[in-house]
């Protein structure tokens, strides 16, 4: 006998919710944006699914009155900063980010005071207050390009992700001061387990997010020929999805949050996608459910707003990122 925890009318209930969300989306003139780590059913109801950079750009250019951000708090804040006239809804305000919490604006101010004249590059996974204290923002898809755009003779403070910082140093050859923050989900993806999976699937291509603690050791082992097989690609979530569709490989080991597997499998049903760690689940991303999306559209709550004095300074850092990387 197979025991299921889902109530027998669950599919019908999900259909009703999807229908209700579609009605409300029209009535509110809303757009639903979802990050690649969202639950499959939330990705499927969204108008657009993508990585942080793509979603920020879409939030900036949308003609909708309401943006329902199915992601985490710093992403909704970024949308509010880039789309000041719009109502930005985050269906659950508890959807935070352990990485963004590793640095506060006060800590950044103290760090800047220790390095007068240094250029501050902040990953988009930061609060609006931290962005306001920064010269440039970056995402995982453009961090190296942003750093390359900074004159060689300038000292750089990079925050908050130490693994992304190390990756940027590796690909640009620049030395930076890097904040020692990490994302608990990506830091938990174990290098030994990833490499063991590759050994048992030698034809599999490795797709690795630069927030992973295992990136450097895996690249090193691939470079040494210790993990023979197809390429190891380090990329943002969007780059990973694109690569999975375009690569000639048939099997992929995916080192990031497992929500991304849904899109990869939808795009390439004939390929095999293996998670590097089944346990790589972001509890914040998973707080967003269809029920909460429908409720947010009904009530136009919970809203995410950023005081204009902070938004104006944070926008400068985001605009500079766009000037460098387009
Ligand atoms: P991406 O910008 O690659 O989508 O990453 C965002 C994120 O939160 C990764 O954990
Ligand atoms: Fe933050 Fe990590 Fe979750 Fe991304 S996966 S939102 S960095 S806690």
Image (spheres, grey):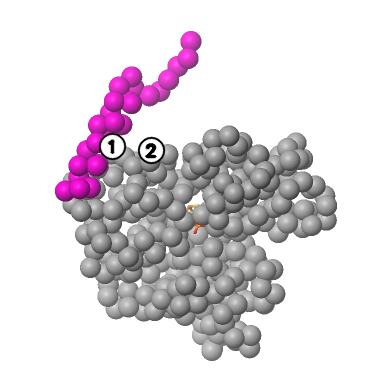
Instruction: Point out the stretch of residues depicted in magenta.
Output: 1-27
Question: In the picture, residue 277 is in which quadrant?
Answer: top right
Reply yes or no: does residue 124 show up in magenta.
no
Marks 1/2 in contact by CB < 8 Å: the verdict is yes
Question: In the picture, residue 41 is in which quadrant?
Answer: top left
Q: Position of residue 25 (x, y in %)?
A: 23, 47
State the mark number for residue 18: 1
Q: Does 317 sit left or right of 299 as displayed? A: right
Reply yes or no: does residue 23 show up in magenta.
yes
Q: Secondary structure at mark 2?
A: helix
- Which residue is at 40% across, 23% downward? 5
State the mark number for residue 41: 2
Q: Nearer the viewer, residue 62 or 286?
A: 62
State the mark number for residue 74: none
Q: Position of residue 244 (x, y in %)?
A: 59, 47
Q: Does 106 sit left or right of 140 as displayed? A: left
Q: Does 257 sit left or right of 289 as displayed? A: right
Q: Tell me if residue 125 comes above or below residue 153 in the rendering.
A: above
On the question of residue 263 being in view, the answer is yes
Instruction: Give the Cα separation between the discs numbered 1 and 2.
Output: 9 Å
Q: Secondary structure at mark 1?
A: helix
Residue occupying the far top of the picture: 1
- Magenta: main secondary structure equals helix
Mark 1 nearby-residue class (10 Å; few <14, some 14–19, many ≥20): many
């Amino acid at each position: 006998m197979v025991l299921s925890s889902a109530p027998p009318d669950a599919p019908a209930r999900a259909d009703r919710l999807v229908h209700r969300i579609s009605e409300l989306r029209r009535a509110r003139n809303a757009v639903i944006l979802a990050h690649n780590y969202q639950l499959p059913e939330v990705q499927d109801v969204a108008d657009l699914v993508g990585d942080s950079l793509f979603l920020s750009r879409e939030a900036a250019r949308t003609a909708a009155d309401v943006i329902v951000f199915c992601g985490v708090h710093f992403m909704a804040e970024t949308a509010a900063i880039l789309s000041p006239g719009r109502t930005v809804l985050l269906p659950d305000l508890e959807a935070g980010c352990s990485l963004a919490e590793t640095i506060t604006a006060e800590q950044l101010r103290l760090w800047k005071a220790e390095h007068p004249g240094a250029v501050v590059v902040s990953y988009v996974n930061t609060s609006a207050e931290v962005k306001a204290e920064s010269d440039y923002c970056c995402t995982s898809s453009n961090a190296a390009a942003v750093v390359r755009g900074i004159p060689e003779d300038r000292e750089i403070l990079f925050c908050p992700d130490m693994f992304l910082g190390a990756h940027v140093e590796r690909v640009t050859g620049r030395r930076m001061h890097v904040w020692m923050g990490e994302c608990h989900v990506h830091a938990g993806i174990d290098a030994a387990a990833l490499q063991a999976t590759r050994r048992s699937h030698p034809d599999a291509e490795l797709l690795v997010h630069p927030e992973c603690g295992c990136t450097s050791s895996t690249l090193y082992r691939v470079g040494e020929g210790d993990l023979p097989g197809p390429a190891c690609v380090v990329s943002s979530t969007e780059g990973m999805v694109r690569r999975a569709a375009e690569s000639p490989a048939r099997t992929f080991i995916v080192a990031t949050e497992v929500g991304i597997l849904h899109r990869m499998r939808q795009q390439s049903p004939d390929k095999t996608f293996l998670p590097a760690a089944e346990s790589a689940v972001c509890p914040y991303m998973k707080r967003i459910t269809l029920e909460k999306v429908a409720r947010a559209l009904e009530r136009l709550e919970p809203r995410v707003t950023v005081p204009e004095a902070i938004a104006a300074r944070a926008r400068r850092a985001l605009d500079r990122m766009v000037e460098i990387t387009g």
